[in-house]
Image (spheres, rainbow, N blue to C red):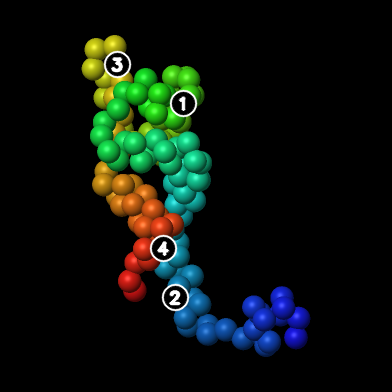
Amino acid sequence: MAESDKHVCEIFCFDEEKVNRIKREVTVTEGLGQIFKALGDETRIKIIYALSREELCVCDVAQIIDATVAAASHHLRLLKNQGLAKSRKQGKMVFYSLKDECIKTIVETALHHLKGEYCKA
């Protein structure tokens, strides 16, 4: 048996009831790809992590990620449009923070996984 064949069933059959039930259930994941796409960029992950620590203005974020204010603003706008961050204007400054704790939890969980601190099933 070839190595590639070890990961494929030797016969084709499926549990129709299980497949139909789960096929209906997986529709709840629609739209998640866009969130993970936004989180799939190293710079945006750094921004999300920084925002999980505290509210930051665009200039702070630019300095943290070693980028221009325009580049930081672009990333922040994308995160805001995806519903991951929120902004507030104070005078001439714009401050960003995470929209909710869920995003912080996702990043913290991924960091635990990266460090080998796996979640218990």
Question: Image point 39% across, 35% down: which residue?
Answer: 47
Q: Badge 2: how crowded within 10 Å, few (<14), some, or many (20+)?
A: few
User: Pointers 2 and 1 in contact (CB under 8 A)?
Assistant: no
User: Pointers 3 and 2 in contact (CB under 8 A)?
Assistant: no
* Apparent side of residue 100 relative to residue 2 in the rendered image (left or right): left
What's under tag 1, amino acid-wise? Asp
Q: Is residue 34 visible?
A: no
Q: Which element is circle 2 on?
A: helix
Residue 28 x, y percent position in the rendering: 41, 60
The answer for how far apart the CA atoms under marks 4 and 1 are is 29 Å
Residue under label 2: 21
Residue under label 4: 116
* Apparent side of residue 89 relative to residue 67 in the rendered image (left or right): left
Figure check: 26 above or below 110: below
Figure check: 114 above or below 47: below
Among numbered discs 4 and 1, the one appearing first in the sequence: 1
Among numbered discs 3 and 1, the one appearing first in the sequence: 1
Residue 87 x, y percent position in the rendering: 30, 28
Q: Which element is circle 4 on?
A: loop
Residue 93: image tag:
3
